[in-house]
């Protein structure tokens, strides 16, 4: 298992550092964090990762002999939500942080502001003449895909809930959730009253 | 009857003074193709074993590191980056051919300034007491004639609190894996040695020497006997390789 973990981390580290070669701004930001250690304690599935920023990228380790400057714990799903989401507040996210939170914020900023120059990478293999039109075409395709995806997301929800009536609307779902909560509270109250009634009946018998 | 002291060279019993010479012969023979054979024989996994050794070493900027039996310098290359210009890495090997290949490779990789080279016997390390923060010996201890003497020598030159890391082939933890591994070692390994390095005997010695090397628990006890504290080991790839760690109190 250790060998597989090491292989996965080595592959991820290699991929990330190769990508960072084409983003000097992020590399400069990471350089300022050199020597710090971020410990990711993932509870489900259980494993630990240590991120150590350095001058020319980041080391990703399965084990670290030095004390971490910041430790972040939680399920993998919750950690990914926090890493990729925009919210900074961790309340209710299922993620706990201990130590220097500035390190976490700095790394999150690095991730958000990642701007890899793929054209530079591609130019190594294809040359500038071919890379320029290909890059422009890829950018147009990316913009088109992004706008189409956004439109599809906006249209899909009303189509599924209003037209096909396969899914409830957000309001109906919220109302249903509220009704379930009320029912749960009422059941709890009833349970408490029954216990009180049983207790008073027993006292009367004695 | 002769009272000459003997030791093992693979499955063969040889005179103690003869072993070092025979081992030297093996490594003179394989030095030129050592890196390529390592990759072919292990499928590149030796890089992961060494990676874990680096992680566990806890080496940081400014440290002094000794890489014994450092061969072609895989660990020294990483350590040179970690210790930085303030630190020092000494690549030591008893074998001149291996040391020359390692030195040429590291110079080509741009590792200069904080790296020194020493042709040294692990049993009699030519360094003052309490010199190093970390000592590693990767796939070298099994070739040493007197392992206890070598461990004592390493203990002497480590600073108090310094770490010794022994990366070495060991005993697979699973019976089935052991059978597959035996077949691979005794049939395929010499064949690969013959095809790639034109030297099947050296790779037969490699397989035999692995079987003669102490298993995980025995080596751990030997380290404790040599004076190391907090000795423990980590099995890798089903125990085919184990990384032992000890701290000088």
Image (tube, helix red, strand yellow):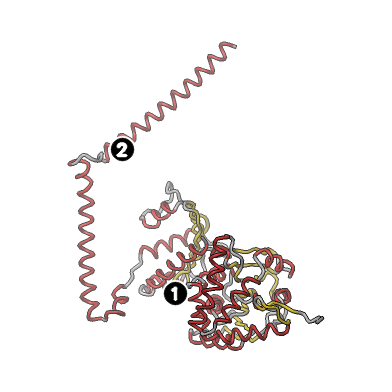
Residue located at (82% from left, 81% from top): B1
Q: Are marks 1 and 2 on the same chain?
A: yes
Secondary element under disc 2, as helix, strand or loop, is helix
> Could you say which disc has been placed on residue A56 in the image?
1
For the residue pair B133 and B229, the one nearer the viewer reads as B229
Residue located at (43% from left, 48% from top): A91
Q: Looking at the picture, how far across and down is residue A206, in whole percent?
A: 60, 12
Q: Looking at the picture, how far across and down is residue B71, in whole percent?
A: 58, 81
Label 2: chain letter: A
Please rate how many residues cluster around mark 1, counting C-alpha atoms within 10 Å: few if below 14, some from 14 to 19, many from 20: some
Secondary element under disc 1, as helix, strand or loop, is loop
Please state, as top left, top right, bottom left or bottom right, where the C terminus of chain B lies in the image: bottom right
**Does residue B16 appear left or right of residue B179 in this picture?**
right
Looking at the image, do the residues carrying marks 1 and 2 touch, with CB atoms under 8 Å apart? no
| Residue A104 sits in quarter | bottom left
Which residue is at the far left?
A163
**Does residue B128 appear left or right of residue B201 in this picture?**
right
Residue located at (58% from left, 85% from top): B98
Which residue is labeled 2 in the image? A174
């Amino acid at each position: 298992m250790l060998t597989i973990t090491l292989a996965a981390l080595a592959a991820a580290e290699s991929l990330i550092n190769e990508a960072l070669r084409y983003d000097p701004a992020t590399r400069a930001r990471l350089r300022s964090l050199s020597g710090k250690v971020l410990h990711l304690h993932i509870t489900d599935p259980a494993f630990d990762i240590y991120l150590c920023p350095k001058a020319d990228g980041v080391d990703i380790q399965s084990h670290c002999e030095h004390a971490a400057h910041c430790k972040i714990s939680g399920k993998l799903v919750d950690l990914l939500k926090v890493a990729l989401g925009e919210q900074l507040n961790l309340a209710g996210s299922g993620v706990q942080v201990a130590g220097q939170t500035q390190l976490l914020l700095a790394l999150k900023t690095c991730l958000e502001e990642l701007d890899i120059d793929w054209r530079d990478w591609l130019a190594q293999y294809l040359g500038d003449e071919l890379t320029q039109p290909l890059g422009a075409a890829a950018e147009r395709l990316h913009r088109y895909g992004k706008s189409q995806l956004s439109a599809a997301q906006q249209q899909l929800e009303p189509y599924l809930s209003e037209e096909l009536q396969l899914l409830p609307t957000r309001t109906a779902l919220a109302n249903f959730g509220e009704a379930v909560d009320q029912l749960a509270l009422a059941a709890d109250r009833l349970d408490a009253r029954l216990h009180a009634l049983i207790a008073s009946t027993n006292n009367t018998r004695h | 009857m002769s009272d000459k002291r003997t030791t093992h060279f693979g499955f063969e019993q040889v005179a103690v003074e003869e072993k070092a010479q025979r081992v030297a012969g093996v490594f003179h023979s394989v030095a030129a193709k050592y890196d390529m054979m390592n990759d072919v024989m292990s499928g590149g996994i030796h890089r992961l074993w060494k990676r874990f050794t680096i992680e566990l070493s806890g080496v940081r900027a400014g440290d002094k590191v000794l890489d014994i039996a450092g061969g072609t310098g895989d660990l020294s290359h990483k350590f040179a980056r970690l210790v930085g210009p303030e630190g020092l890495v000494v690549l030591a090997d008893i074998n001149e051919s291996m040391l020359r290949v390692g030195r040429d490779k590291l110079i080509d990789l741009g590792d200069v300034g904080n790296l020194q080279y020493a042709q040294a016997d692990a049993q009699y390390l030519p360094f003052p007491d309490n010199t190093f923060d970390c000592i590693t010996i990767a796939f070298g201890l099994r070739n040493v004639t007197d392992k206890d003497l070598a461990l004592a020598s390493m203990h002497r030159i480590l600073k108090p609190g310094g770490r010794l890391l022994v990366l070495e082939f060991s005993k697979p933890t699973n019976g089935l894996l052991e059978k597959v591994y035996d077949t691979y070692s005794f049939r395929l390994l010499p064949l690969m040695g013959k095809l790639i390095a034109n030297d099947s005997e050296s790779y037969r010695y490699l397989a035999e020497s692995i079987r003669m090397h102490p298993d995980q628990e025995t080596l751990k006890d030997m380290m404790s006997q040599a004076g190391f504290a907090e000795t423990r080991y980590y099995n890798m790839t089903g125990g085919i390789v184990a990384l032992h760690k000890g701290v000088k109190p």
